[in-house]
Image: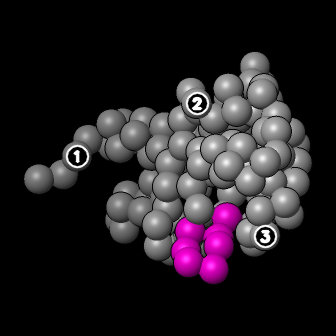
Amino acid sequence: MRIPSITLHASLAGATASPDSTIVSITSDTGDVDVRQLPGMMRNAGHAPDPEVTSFLDTAEITTLEYVHSQVVQTPPHTIGSEALCSFVTSASSKLSLQSECAEDASGDIFELDGDLDVNDPDA
C-alpha cells in the first residue's frame, strides 16, 4: 500500500523542520549524562546552577538519541536559546569533570520526496 504523496510530504517536513534546537552530548567516565541531570549534579557538588536554565530544563522538550550519545533540546526564541544552554553545559561540565559538546542545530534543507525511490535525499 502506498501512502499518498501529500501526507508523506507533510510528515517529512514536520519531522525534519526544527529550526530552533540545540544538540548536546555529555559524558562521564561511566557513560552518558542526561542534560536534565546537570542542575542536580551541580547542587550535589556544592555549585549553584543557573536558575533560569534549571527552570528551562524542567519543561524543555528533549529527545535522546541513544546510538549517537546525544540529545536534541528544543530551544525556540522565547526560551533561553542555544548560546545560554551551551554556556551552562560547558560551565557545568568543567566544574563536574564531564566531557561535553554543545552546538546549535544547523537544520538542513528539506527536499521533496523522490517519487521513484520514496526518499527525500536529493543525491539518491
Provide the residue designation for mark 2.
Answer: 58
Provide the residue designation for mark 3.
Answer: 97
Crowd band around label 2 with a 10 angstrom C-alpha radius: few (<14), some (14–19), many (20+): few
Residue type beneath disc 2: Asp
- Cα separation, mark 2 vs mark 3, equals 23 Å
Query: Which residue is painted at 80% across and 54% down in the image?
Result: 92
Residue type beneath disc 1: Ile
Q: Nearer the viewer, mark 2 or mark 3?
A: 3
- Mark 1 and mark 3 residues within 8 Å of each other at the beta carbon: no
Q: Is residue 56 left or right of residue 31?
A: right
Image: 52 above or below 21: above
Image: 79 above or below 46: above
x then y, percent, for residue 13: 51, 41
Predominant SS of the magenta segment: strand
Query: Which residue is painted at 26% across and 41% down in the image?
Result: 4
Disc nearer the start of the sequence (2/3): 2
Q: Is residue 30 left or right of residue 86?
A: left
Residue situated in front as seen by the camera: 27 or 24: 27
Residue type beneath disc 3: Ser
Provide the residue designation for mark 1.
Answer: 3
Residue 57, by quadrant, is top right
Residue situated in front as seen by the camera: 107 or 35: 35
- Cα separation, mark 1 vs mark 2, equals 38 Å
Judge whether residue 28 is colored magenta: yes
Q: Label 2, secondary structure: give it.
A: helix
Residue situated in front as seen by the camera: 98 or 1: 98
Q: Which residues are magenta?
A: 26-32
* Residue ranking furthest to the left: 1
Query: Which residue is painted at 67% across and 64% down in the image?
Result: 26
Disc nearer the start of the sequence (1/3): 1
Q: Is residue 30 left or right of residue 45?
A: left
